[in-house]
Image (cartoon, rainbow, N blue to C red):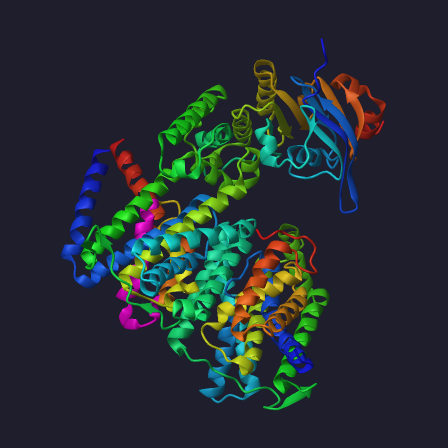
C-alpha cells in the first residue's frame, strides 16, 4: 500500500466520481422536477457520446462543435421523451410503477438501438488537452481527467446559479415543490417539466462525452452509468441535485480505494453494492434531509 | 360455464398435439415458452399481487442453471440434486437479500433489484472457476424420468409444461387464498393493511423467496434443455425480459403469463433475420404496453370481451 | 365493585417533530365500553396522537397503557392483533378490491394460514377462507353494503368508503376502535348515519371508541370529551361542559 497507489486511487476516484456526479445530477434534476426516476439516464450519456463520436469520425466536424452537438442531442432526447411519453402518462395519472417501466423500456430500446446500429465495439474520443499526463507523488493523472473535473465542477456551479438566480430555474424549483401552487402563479408546469428533462439529458450527455476519452463508450455503458449515477444522486440526497457532486465523488473514491485490495474487475460490483447499502441505511443521503423514502 | 369447459378441452387437445405437429425448432421454442412462463409467473405474482417490480430474476434463473450444470457436469451428481441445490441457493439468497431490500419501496426497491441482477451477472462472469465464464459449462445431460429419457423436444415439452401448469395452479391457489387477499391489501394501501394486523415485511419476503424458487426451477429446466449454460443468458437484459412477461400478458392474470411468455420467446425468433433488432422491439413493446395497455394483453382482451358482451345485451334488450 | 383498569390509558405523552412540539403531557383514560372524544382545532396534534396510540409513531415521552400494560415496542400489527384498530382521516380503502374483499381483508387477522397451506389449497386453508368469506358477508349485510359487494371500492362515495372502512375495522372484532376525523368529507345525512353506527357499535357490541373530530355535533355521541389545543389538554367533560368551559370558548370563539 504505497502512497503512489493511494494517490492514484484518489485521483481515479475523483475523476470517475465527477462523471457519476454529472449523470446523477441529471437524474436528480429530473426527479426533482417530475418525481420520475429516469432509469434511462445513462443512455443520455451513451447517445450523447456516440453522437459526438459519429460527428467527429464520420462527418469530420471540429471537436468542439461535435461536443456541443452531442450535448445538444442529449438535451433534445430528454425533451422528446418528456413530450412524447411522460406528458401523456402524467395526464392519465399513471402510477409510479408505470413510469419506472416506461424508462426501463426506453433504456432497453436505446441501448439495443446502439447495439444494432453501431455494433458491439467501444469507441473513443480524443482526450482534451492531448495525451499528456501530470504526475502527483508519482501517480499519473491524464490532462483530460483534470479538464473533466474542472468542467464537471463548473457545470455544478452553473447549475446552482441556474436554480437560484435565473427565472426559469426558480420556476422549476417552485413547480417541483408545489405544482398546483406554481400553476396559479402562471408557471407552465408542463413546460417546466420538459426543461427538467432537457437539463437531465444535457448533464447526462456531458458526462458521457467527458468519460469517453478515458474508458470508451459502448452500448452497455448506459446501465452502468444509470446505476452509478443513481447511487451518486441518492448519496447526495435525491431532493438536492447539487448533492450529487458529493455523492459522486464519494462513490468514486469508495470504488477506487476498495479495489486496491481486490481485483479491479470487482469495481462495478462494489459500486452497485454501495448503492444497495446506502438505499437501505441512508435513503436520505449524506446531505439531504429525510425526503420521501424511495416511493 | 359449458362454453368455458369446451374451450378448455379444445385448448388441451391443441396443447397436447402441438409438439407432434409443428417443426422441431418450433417445439424447441415452445419448451422455452414453458420455462419462461415459470420464471415470469414469479415476477407476475410480485407485480400483480404486491405491486413490486422485481428486476433480479436472472440472478435466480442463473443460480438454478449453474446449480444444475455444476452438480451434474462438474460433480457428476444426479440431476435431482442440481435442482435442489439451485433451489436452496436461490431461496437462501432471496431471503438474505430480500429481508433488507424489501424494506424499500417503489423506485428504490426496483433499482435495488436491478443492481442485484447487475452484481450477479458480473459475479457469474468473474467467478469463472465456478461458472466457466463466457465459455460456460457444457455437456449437461438430458433429464431422465423413471428411466424414460427426455431427450427430444416433444418429450421435454410435456415435462416442462406440466410443471408450468402445476406452478400456475399453485399461483392461482395463492391468489384466491387468504394470503392473496393480504397481498392485494398490502398493494393497495400498506398503511391500512398494517392497521389490520397484516405483516407486510414477512409477506413481501415470502413471495420474493417464492419468486426466486420459480426462477431457479426455470433455470434448472433451461440447463437441461440447452445442455450448455454461459453468462450471456443471465444478464440484466434477461431480467428485463422476465419482467416483460407479466407486463405484456397482464400482471394480475395467470393465463396472461403464457401470452407474455409466447411473446418473449417467439418475437426474437421471428425477427432473427434482423439480428439484434428484437431487443429494440422488446423495449418498444414494453413502452407501448406501459403507455397504451396498462393491464397487458389479457386486460385488453377482457375489456374487449366486456365491450362485446355489453353490445350483445344492448342489442338483445 | 372493583374499578377495572381503563382499556386505554395515556400518561404524559409528549412528542415533537424537529423543533416543533406537537404534544405535551397528554394524560387521559379511555374506560372500557365508553365513547371518548378528542376535539380540537386543526394542528392541535390529534392525528399525531392517534398515530402514536396505534403505533405508527413512537412518542418521545410518555406511556401508552393498553389493558394495564404499556405498549413498549409493539408494532402496528401487534397492537391491531391485541384489539386496537384505527381508521384514517381519508378513508384508506383498498381501491382495486371489491367491497366484499375489503371486508374480508379485515377478517384475515382472525385466522392463520401459512404460505404453503395457501399454495396447496389444503382443507385448512379452504376452511379458513370460507369462514372469512362468511364473516365478511355477514358484516356486509349488517352495514348495508350487501348490494355493493362486488363493486370495486374505488367507485364508492366518501360516505360509503367511511362505512366500508369501519365495517372492515370492526369485522376483526377489536376491543378499541380509533376513529380519526370520521366525518371529514361527509355530508349531513352521511354524518347522521355515521353517528348512528357509532352509537350502535358501542351499545350492541360493547365496543370502546376513541373519536377524534373537529365536528362538535358529532362529538355529542361521546360521554367524555377532551379538548386538545396546541398539544395540551385544556378541558375535559361532556360536550355541554366543554362548550361552557372558559378556556375552550377563548380558544374557539375568542371570547
Q: Is residue C90 visible?
A: no
Is residue A138 depicted above or below C211 in this figure?
Answer: below
* Identity of the residue furthest to the top in this view: C1
Residue A153 is situated, as x and y percent measured from the top left of the image, at 68, 75
Q: Is residue A152 visible?
A: yes
Instruction: Please indicate whether residue B71 sits to the left or right of residue C71 in the image.
Output: left
Residue at 17%, 46% (x, y): give it. Answer: B13
Is residue A48 depicted above or below C35 in this figure?
Answer: below
Q: Main secondary structure of the magenta part?
A: helix
Residue at 57%, 24% (x, y): give it. Answer: C174
Check residue B261 for magenta coloring: yes
Residue at 45%, 48% (x, y): give it. Answer: B209
The residue nearer to you, when weighing B175 against C202, is B175
Is residue B22 depicted above or below B276 in this figure?
Answer: above
Instruction: Please indicate whether residue B280 sits to the left or right of residue A272 in the image.
Output: left
Q: Quadrant of residue C72?
A: top right
Q: Quadrant of residue B82?
A: bottom left
Residue A275 is situated, as x and y percent measured from the top left of the image, at 58, 61
Residue C231 is situated, as x and y percent measured from the top left of the image, at 78, 34
Q: In the picture, which quadrant includes the C terminus of chain B?
A: top left
Instruction: Please indicate whether residue C72 sits to the left or right of residue B186 in the image.
Output: right
Residue C20 is situated, as x and y percent measured from the top left of the image, at 78, 44
Q: Which residues are magenta?
A: B254-278
Check residue B85 for magenta coloring: no
The residue nearer to you, when weighing A33 against B99, is B99
Q: How many marks?
A: 0
Amino acid at each position: 500500500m504505497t502512497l503512489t497507489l493511494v494517490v492514484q486511487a484518489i485521483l481515479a476516484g475523483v475523476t470517475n466520481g465527477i462523471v457519476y456526479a454529472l449523470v446523477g445530477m441529471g437524474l436528480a434534476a429530473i426527479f426533482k422536477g417530475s418525481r420520475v426516476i429516469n432509469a434511462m439516464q445513462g443512455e443520455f450519456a451513451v447517445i450523447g457520446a456516440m453522437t459526438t463520436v459519429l460527428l467527429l469520425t464520420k462527418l469530420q466536424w471540429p471537436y468542439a462543435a461535435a461536443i456541443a452537438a452531442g450535448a445538444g442531442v442529449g438535451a433534445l432526447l430528454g425533451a422528446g421523451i418528456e413530450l412524447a411519453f411522460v406528458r401523456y402518462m402524467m395526464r392519465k395519472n399513471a402510477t409510479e410503477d408505470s413510469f419506472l417501466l416506461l424508462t426501463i423500456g426506453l433504456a432497453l430500446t436505446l441501448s439495443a438501438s446502439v447495439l444494432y446500429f453501431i455494433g458491439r465495439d467501444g469507441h473513443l474520443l480524443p482526450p482534451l488537452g492531448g495525451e499528456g499526463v501530470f504526475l502527483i507523488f508519482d501517480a499519473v493523472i491524464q490532462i483530460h481527467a483534470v479538464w473533466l473535473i474542472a468542467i464537471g465542477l463548473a457545470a455544478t456551479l452553473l447549475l446552482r446559479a441556474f436554480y437560484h438566480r435565473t427565472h426559469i430555474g426558480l420556476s422549476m424549483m417552485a413547480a417541483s415543490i408545489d405544482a398546483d401552487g406554481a400553476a396559479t402563479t402562471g408557471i407552465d408546469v408542463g413546460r417546466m417539466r420538459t426543461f427538467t428533462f432537457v437539463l437531465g439529458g444535457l448533464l447526462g450527455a456531458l458526462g458521457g462525452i467527458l468519460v469517453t476519452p478515458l474508458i470508451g463508450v459502448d452500448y452497455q455503458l448506459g446501465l452502468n452509468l444509470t446505476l452509478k449515477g443513481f447511487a451518486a444522486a441518492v448519496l447526495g440526497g435525491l431532493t438536492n441535485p447539487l448533492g450529487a457532486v458529493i455523492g459522486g465523488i464519494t462513490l468514486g473514491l469508495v470504488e477506487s480505494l476498495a479495489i486496491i485490495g481486490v481485483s479491479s474487475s470487482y469495481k462495478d460490483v462494489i459500486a452497485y453494492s454501495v448503492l444497495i447499502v446506502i438505499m437501505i441505511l441512508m435513503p436520505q443521503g449524506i446531505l439531504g434531509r429525510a425526503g420521501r423514502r424511495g416511493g | 360455464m359449458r362454453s368455458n369447459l369446451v374451450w378448455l378441452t379444445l385448448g388441451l387437445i391443441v396443447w397436447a398435439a402441438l409438439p407432434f405437429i409443428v417443426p422441431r425448432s418450433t417445439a424447441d421454442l415452445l419448451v422455452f415458452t414453458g420455462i419462461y412462463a415459470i420464471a415470469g409467473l414469479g415476477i407476475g405474482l410480485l407485480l400483480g399481487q404486491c405491486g413490486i417490480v422485481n428486476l433480479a430474476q436472472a440472478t435466480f434463473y442463473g443460480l438454478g442453471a449453474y446449480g444444475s450444470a455444476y452438480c451434474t457436469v462438474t460433480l457428476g451428481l444426479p440431476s435431482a440434486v442440481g435442482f435442489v441445490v439451485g433451489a436452496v441457493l436461490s431461496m437462501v439468497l432471496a431471503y438474505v437479500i430480500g429481508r433488507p431490500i424489501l424494506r424499500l419501496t417503489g423506485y428504490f426497491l426496483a433499482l435495488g433489484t436491478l443492481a442485484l441482477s447487475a452484481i450477479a451477472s458480473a459475479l457469474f462472469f468473474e467467478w469463472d472457476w465456478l461458472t466457466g465464464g463466457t465459455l460456460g459449462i457444457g455437456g449437461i445431460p438430458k433429464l431422465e424420468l423413471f428411466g424414460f429419457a427426455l431427450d427430444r423436444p416433444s418429450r421435454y415439452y410435456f415435462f416442462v409444461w406440466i410443471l408450468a401448469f402445476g406452478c400456475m395452479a399453485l399461483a392461482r391457489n395463492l391468489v384466491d387464498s387468504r394470503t392473496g387477499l393480504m397481498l392485494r391489501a398490502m398493494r393497495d394501501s400498506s398503511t391500512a393493511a398494517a392497521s389490520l394486523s397484516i405483516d407486510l415485511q414477512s409477506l413481501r419476503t415470502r413471495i420474493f423467496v417464492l419468486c426466486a424458487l420459480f426462477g431457479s426451477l426455470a433455470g434448472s429446466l433451461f440447463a437441461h434443455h440447452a445442455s450448455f449454460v454461459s453468462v450471456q443468458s443471465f444478464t440484466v437484459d434477461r431480467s428485463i425480459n422476465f419482467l416483460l412477461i407479466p407486463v405484456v400478458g397482464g400482471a394480475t392474470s395467470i393465463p396472461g403469463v403464457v401470452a407474455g411468455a409466447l411473446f418473449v420467446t417467439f418475437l426474437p425468433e421471428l425477427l432473427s433475420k434482423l439480428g439484434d433488432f428484437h431487443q429494440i422491439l422488446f423495449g418498444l413493446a414494453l413502452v407501448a404496453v406501459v403507455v397504451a395497455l396498462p393491464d397487458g394483453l389479457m386486460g385488453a382482451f377482457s375489456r374487449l370481451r366486456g365491450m362485446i358482451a355489453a353490445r350483445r345485451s344492448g342489442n338483445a334488450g | 365493585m372493583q374499578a377495572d383498569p381503563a382499556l386505554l390509558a395515556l400518561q404524559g405523552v409528549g412528542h415533537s417533530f424537529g423543533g416543533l412540539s406537537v404534544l405535551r403531557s397528554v394524560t387521559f383514560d379511555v374506560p372500557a365500553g365508553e365513547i371518548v372524544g378528542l376535539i380540537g382545532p386543526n394542528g392541535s396534534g390529534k392525528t399525531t396522537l392517534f398515530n402514536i396510540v396505534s403505533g405508527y409513531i413512537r412518542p418521545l415521552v410518555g406511556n401508552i397503557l393498553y389493558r394495564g400494560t404499556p405498549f413498549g415496542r409493539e408494532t402496528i400489527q401487534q397492537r391491531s392483533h391485541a384489539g386496537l384498530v384505527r381508521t384514517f382521516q381519508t378513508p384508506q380503502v383498498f381501491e382495486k378490491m371489491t367491497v366484499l374483499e375489503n371486508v374480508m381483508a379485515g377478517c384475515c387477522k382472525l385466522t392463520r394460514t401459512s404460505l404453503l397451506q395457501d399454495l396447496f389449497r389444503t382443507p385448512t386453508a379452504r376452511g379458513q377462507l370460507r369462514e372469512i368469506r362468511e364473516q365478511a358477508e355477514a358484516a356486509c349485510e349488517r352495514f348495508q353494503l350487501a348490494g355493493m359487494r362486488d363493486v370495486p371500492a374505488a367507485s364508492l362515495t366518501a360516505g360509503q368508503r367511511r362505512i366500508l372502512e369501519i365495517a372492515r375495522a370492526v369485522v376483526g372484532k377489536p376491543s378499541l376502535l380509533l376513529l380519526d376525523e370520521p366525518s371529514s368529507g361527509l355530508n349531513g345525512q352521511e354524518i347522521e348515519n355515521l353517528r348512528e353506527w357509532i352509537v350502535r357499535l358501542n351499545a350492541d357490541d360493547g365496543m370502546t371508541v376513541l373519536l377524534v373530530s373537529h365536528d362538535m355535533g358529532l362529538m355529542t355521541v361521546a360521554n367524555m370529551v377532551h379538548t386538545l389545543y396546541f398539544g395540551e389538554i385544556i378541558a375535559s367533560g361532556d360536550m355541554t361542559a366543554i362548550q361552557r368551559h372558559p378556556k375552550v370558548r377563548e380558544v374557539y370563539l375568542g371570547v
